[in-house]
Amino acid sequence: MLRRLSLSAAIIAAGAAPAFAHLDPLAHGSFMAGVSHPLFGLDHILAMLTVGLWAAQLSDRDGNRKALWLVPLAFVATMAVGFAAGTAGVSLPFVEPAILASVIALGLLLAIPARLPAAACAAIVGVFALFHGHAHGSELGSAGALQFSLGFLAATVLLHCAGIAIGLGLSGFSPSLSRLLGAMTALLGLSLAFG
């Protein structure tokens, strides 16, 4: 019992910690800065892992392996579009609230689990990815944009793959474990939004 309480306290503390993904723009510009950028913000990590978990859940539940690649691909492709828009100076309203909403919404969609066609799920993650990409691009400016974008896209793909691997692994034990992770993600998203 004490061990479960300690784990719960650690998870809540991690959720209450500030997001560090949005660093000084002068520190950006290299491939490795791009790789590390999503790894220092809990909002980005949660959203990207949850996309992978949700893709695994969708493919496992419906026996449709198309979701396994379509949903993460939609996120990565649309995030690249958002990044290009951000570096070009295109304004997008409510970027930070939309990023936090993505963590909560994706967690809830995983927890429910939502029964939607793979194309609709790809569209949902694509909308959220646009904001994630825009945040990266608008903070960077134009210095080293190509190297940085390749780095953060690679890190995103790796986080999606980790989510898929976790999701497929959990489906062998119990589908409810992925749903529990979705609920925890939504709660952590709420703690980030109100923290």
Image (tube, rainbow, N blue to C red):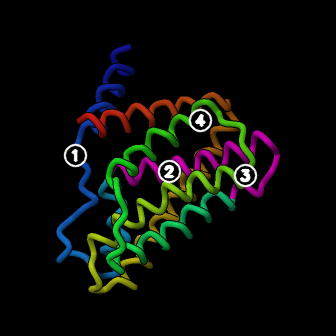
What residue did someone put label 2 on? 49
Dot 1 surroundings within 10 Å: few (below 14), some, or many (20 or more)? few
What secondary structure predominates along the stretch shown in magenta?
helix
Q: Are marks 1 and 3 in contact (CB under 8 Å)?
A: no
Q: Are marks 2 and 4 in contact (CB under 8 Å)?
A: no
Q: Secondary structure at mark 2?
A: helix
What residue did someone put label 3 on? 118
Q: Which residue shows up at 47% across the image and 63% down it?
A: 130
Q: Secondary structure at mark 3?
A: helix
**Hey, what amino acid is under mark 1?**
Pro
Which stretch appears magenta? 42-68
Q: Are marks 4 and 1 in contact (CB under 8 Å)?
A: no
Q: Is residue 57 magenta?
A: yes
In the image, is residue 25 above or below residue 192? below
**Mark earlier in primary sequence (1, 3):** 1
**Mark earlier in primary sequence (4, 1):** 1
**Hey, what amino acid is under mark 4?**
Ser
Q: Nearer the viewer, mark 4 or mark 1?
A: 1
Q: In the rendering, at what x and y percent does residue 183 appear?
A: 49, 30
What residue did someone put label 4 on? 178
Q: Quadrant of residue 89?
A: bottom left
What residue did someone put label 1 on? 18
